[in-house]
Image (tube, rainbow, N blue to C red):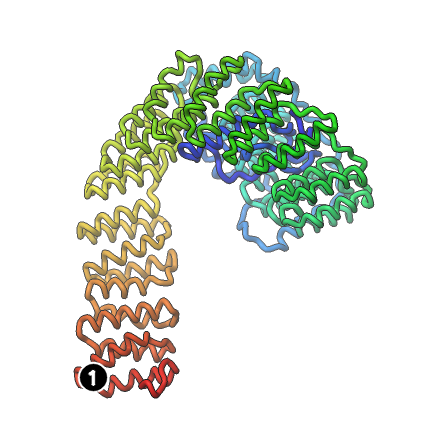
Amino acid sequence: MKILGNVVSFRLINNSIEHQPGSVRFWAYFSSRVSRSNNPSSHSNPSLCSQFVEKIDFDEREQVGFGNKQMDVEGFRVLEKSDNQEHCFDGDEGSDEGDEDGSEGDIEDDFRVLDSFGRNSQWRVSAEIVEGDKDDSIRHAIVKEVCRLIDQQLGWNVKLEGELRHLLRSLKPQEVCAVLRSQADERVALRFFYWADRQWRYRHDKIVYYAMLEILSKTKLCQGSRRILRLMGRRVIERTPEAFGFVMVSYSRAGMMRSAMRMLTVMQKAGVEPNLSICNTGIHVLVMGNMLEKALRFLDRMQLVGITPNVVSYNCIIKGYCQAHQIQKAVELLSDMPLKGCSPDKVSYYTIMNFLCKEKRIHELRELMDKMLKDSNLMPDQVTYNTLIHMLSKHCYGDEALQFLREAEERGFHIDKVGYSAIVHSFCQEGRIDKAKELVNEMFEKGCSPDVVTYTTVLDGFCRLGKLDQAKRLLQQMFKHGCKPNTVSYTAFLNGLCRSGNSLEAREMLNMSEEEWWTPNAITYSVVMHGLRREGKLAEACDLVREMLKKGFQPNPVEINLLIQSLCRERKAHEAKKFMHECQNKGCAINVVNFTTIIHGFCQKDDLEGAMSLLDDMYLSNKHPDTITFTALFDALGKKGRIAEATDLMMKMLHKGLVPTPITYRTVIHHYCRLGRVEDLLKLLEKMLLRQSCRTAYNQVIEKLCRFGHLEEAYKLLGKVLRTASRVDANTCHMLMESYLAKGLPLSSYKVACRMFNRNLIPDLKICEKVSKKLLLEGKSEEADKIMLRLVERGCISPDCQ
């Protein structure tokens, strides 16, 4: 169902579903599948003449920035560096990289590019980008064959590359675009684009460049977008403002707002005149970067140079006000828009409604609906009610969504099964399964048969509440009502079994999938695997991963690490290492965390040889150890007393430019102080502090020395601690005083107290009383009186008490 027509979603990538382990990953997957028909249609162009408002979904899906990273073959290998490094093709553009923490004036300078509006005529004729029928191109046989060859890139050889090269010359530009759009991993699409561009007697058509820029604008691969833009300049391919807009959006997704706005300057140097679409993109980028004030100044600059804002421009500002929780200003802008010669559309109102729904401000929501009819003559229609139902359901306000559903039906609007399913999903999320069942029965009474999405929502609700028997009966009833359960339905049930501790039953059900005519996917395997892992059935979990790999599904590094971690807790580091290498050989993405987890497992077993051997394997796998890896190894070597090797390892870490963490400091200080090697520790600390300052480093040294009985060394370091005279320093001094008292050295404790007084620090009264009594017992009455007298001078005790 299309709610808003051409509504474009601009979401910065925060967290990909693939990085969520176990049942968490399933819930994100389940929500996205349950609401698959609730999304409004979205235009593919992220910057041009589109309403810049958040996609109004019934779920919280995020766009995935890029797919699997492990794709790497001979044919594309030479292009690996293109994602991390740019080559300057046209010197007139300069570099737009640099520090992202630039001053406000830097972005303001980019606004002046708008002053060139109307002066340049070199690029006034906009390029007509003809994309053709995307669906027909994707279904073309030659496109499918090219995609098949690209999918086989892990096993590429000269023959396969020759076949792909031959097919490439037969592809039409629209078909090349279809190949690029068919890739699930945008990095693979980018590598194919570069590879094809390098082939003899082949050059990309203009529309291929724009298609690639469009694909990258949905990701964080801003360096790739920038390089393609430069390549277009080198190949003398017309670059319109739209091309620069794609790159701006990609930079904004990567959080590089300054670089995004610098594209306006790059565009000016290229002789391209700004138009309304690129200005709208600039406003949107600023709003998404929480720079509303700059967006408003940018809007003013547009009008000064003669670029009249349209409804898209104002919708961006409205969204900015809503994000800043300035709803009143957003409503005021709605009222002012007709005075500015631009009437608000429904998207303008829907944007504010979305934020009112999020905060459950129903009264203001109804006032806005009245305003929409009275001021803008926009009648609330079925789309309006569907939008409200979905927005309220998304934020788990099922009762309020149901009220609007009743109101819509009273006005004669028909709410279909998608709207009902949204409310059912909301009730299930709230744990109100009985209310959800009532609504499903109502759907039957009104002749609106629930579909697999509705049933799966209720099924998942039963599983969340642990009512597996009812969930199983519902699964069987779906067949009776002519609604065959899909993979999501079975995955929801399997997840319920695993959460209730019945992972073996889930495993058996997974084995029966072929007989029951349903196909498990990667999420299904992941759910069962983590169920087995949580129950301690690690051998079965590893076997399931091997079966998963045979079926062509690959667990992500987070899932692999959870299983490796469980094996290491059971002191099975060798099995964990073997399992990781199996996954690595099957093409799974293995990262530094996986190696570090197993190294830590070896260290816990006191198997230093195994840990150091795995460190060598890391380098052979082109995985470089991080600070946590070095800290774990240092700790293990320190426990064995091999402090020289541990020191060499720490120096190697610092030489690589890695920053020590607080845990690193504690580990290093502990082992050096235990061995009493204070001089060596101080030399190492000086080098560590150059990399990363640690305010309490010397405090920790003194405290550790006190615990290990090295009081003289601790006293020598007291001067480094008393430089700042903070509460932390006072606590350190108190520990040293207590340690001296425990050793029967009250005079040394008295000296520490005197040094504290000299730095305007007041020692603890109770400790001072203990010191005074001990001094009196040793016949040092003068020192005993002095310490109490100084407390009287500071007002800590009264003279009478003295």
Q: Place residue 227 in its image quadrant.
A: top right
* Front residue of 799 and 575: 799
Which amino acid is tagged 1? Answer: Leu
Residue 264: quarter of image? top right
Depicted 585 relative to depicted 743: above or below = above
Relative to 13, does residue 109 appear above or below in the rendering?
below
Residue at 26% in and 33% down = 577
Quadrant (top left/top right/bottom left/bottom right) for the N terminus: top right
**Mark 1 residue crowding within 10 angstroms, few (<14) / some (14–19) / many (20+):** some
Residue holding disc 1: 776
Please indicate, yes or no, whether residue 684 appears anywhere in the rendered image. Answer: yes
Q: Is residue 238 left or right of residue 150?
A: right
The foreground one among 558 and 657 is 558
Would residue 396 be found to the left or right of residue 116 on screen? left
Q: What is the x, y in percent for residue 212? A: 58, 29
Q: Is residue 408 left or right of residue 74?
A: right
